[in-house]
Structure formats: C-alpha cells, structure tokens
Amino acid sequence: MTIERIEEICYGVENMDACEKFARDMGLDVVSIAPEKRVFCSAVNQLLTFHPLDFPDLPKGIEDGPSLRRLTWGVSSSDDLDRLGRALGPAATRRDNELNIVDPNGLALSFRVAQKLKTDAVFRPTNQYEDVDRLNERLTSYGAPRPMRFVHVALNITKENNDAALAFYTGPLRFKATDKILDTGTFLQSDGDIEHHNFFLCFRPDKAGINHFAAEVYDLDAVIEAGNSMIEAGWKESRKLGRHLIGSNSFRFVHAPFGGRVEFVADMDRMDKSWVTKVWDKNPGHHIWMLKSSGSDPSPQ
C-alpha cells in the first residue's frame, strides 16, 4: 500500500471563532463553515478541520484542552486501502471508504483515498553576481502567502511509547525513518513520498500531545512574510526565523489557538528510498542558523 500525504488534520477546540480567524489569516481556503464544524484547505486540497471539544463524534484526545484529535492519511487507491486494512488486522475498523485505528500513543488515525488537486510552484526571479534573472523589475510583496500544502505533523510522545510507536509506523504503515535522534525522536517519511519527513515522533518534552503541523509556502521570503502577516493579525510568534539542520528547511513558528503551533516552511530536503537512515546519539542542534538581532532597527535616515 502507498501512503502519499496528510489528508486531514482534525482538532477539538475551545474557541471556534478564534480558530477560524487563524485559518483565514494563514491564507487557507474556506471549505465550509457550520456551528460545529469549520473546514479549510491547502492549495492541494488537504483539510484543516475544527470541532468543539464536546462534539460527539470527536475521538478522545491524548491531552487535555484544544489539541489534535484525528490525523487522516491519504492513500493512492482503494486497493491500497484494502491492503492497509489487511496489514493492520482486526484492530482497524472500516466505515464507508475510510479505515480507522488508534496508534500506540492513543492518537486516532484514519486513512482514505487522497483527493489531490494540482497547484503551480511559485518561483521569484533572482539576481546573483553576473547571473541576472530579474532586470528592470522590482519584487512585490507576497502579503499573506497561501499555503501550498501541509507537509508534516510533529507529535509529542512519551519515551515509554517510543518503541511501540516506531514499530507501528515503520511496520504495518511502512513509514521510513530518515533521521533517528536517540535523545529527541524520529523523523518519518511515508512510503509514497520523498519529503524528508511527513511525521515526527518527538519526546521533547516528555509529554504526549500535539507539537505542530507544518504548512509549506513558496520560499524564504514567503516564510518571513507569512510570519509577519500572522503577527500583524495579532498572533504570537513561537520561534524566530531560522533554517533547520535536520530537514534543511527555513522555518517560522506561530502559536495556534487550536493547540500547539503552526510552522511555515520552505525548501525542505527530499530523500528517495536509497537514503540510509542516519542515527544520532544526541541532538545535533535544531538549526543551521536562527535570526539574531542587536536590538531595534535604527530609524530610517
């Protein structure tokens, strides 16, 4: 079977209006708005869904308060769904065209055939020394860049659950560990993708719950402008602009009212199936660089 991508990220939340505002401020498209269900999507049609905490069909959370309640993965075909059902065995239940199971951390997972849309990549012309791609033309602002896709989810788990969780995801679900950091967690790639990671099992801090999900935008400029746009809209930054060492992507984190954070990313590593898992005894560091400042910007002269 082939798991291609994240299909839907579903949260139980306390403040539906705040979560709707956050999603709109992110630049996500509106799918539907109802009192007990608000749905938004990326450019390639991955869903971000909010329900009230007491919504009756919402799976139990792995932490109290607003948080991730269900993570849905998109598979290539209905045959893949059937094969996945056989691999998971009687612990998985089938409802209509969706397969459901609870992972070793207590997180509700669903699987269904991916409903993909195409979107165009955005490339800004650049200039460097004698390599001139932009002549007699100024750049314009992205404003609030529209997220192209949701690239990964990072989940905090307890160290006690780590072995069971890894066996589950790399076993019947066929995820591959791209980087395994023994004191931090494991970056996992789905079998139908070459993204450095689609899922991160992280035991830092040693508490189960949502850490973040990542939304891919066009480039480093878009990461900067996405964060600026969110701050201008009243949201709080969680981590300064930087570029990760593991994954190589530029990043900017913003606290989310639905639990955890959202990471805006661009230019992440791609690893094909010939990549050999790198095992690190200790965390090599979170970033290649992170924005530093000597204080406020000087007044323009």
Image: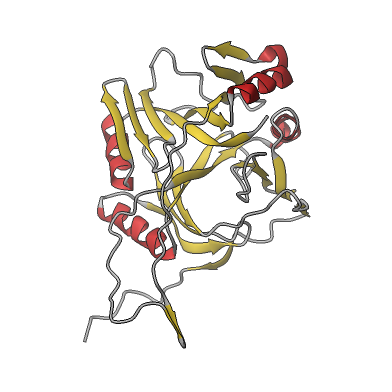
Q: Position of residue 259 (x, y in %)?
A: 43, 36
Q: Position of residue 301 (x, y in %)?
A: 21, 87
Q: Position of residue 13 (x, y in %)?
A: 38, 28
Which quarter of the rendered picture does the N terminus lie within?
A: top right
Q: Residue at x 22, y 82 (%)?
A: 300
Establish if 13 lies above or below 295. above
Q: Quadrant of residue 51?
A: top left
Q: Position of residue 94 (x, y in %)?
A: 58, 12
270 sits left or right of 118 in the view: right
Q: Nearer the viewer, residue 20 or 219?
A: 219
Q: Residue at x 42, y 30 (%)?
A: 66
Q: Residue at x 61, y 19 (%)?
A: 101
Q: Quadrant of residue 228?
A: bottom left
Q: Quadrant of residue 225?
A: bottom left
44 sits left or right of 102 in the view: left
Q: Nearer the viewer, residue 61 or 268?
A: 268
Establish if 111 lies above or below 232. above
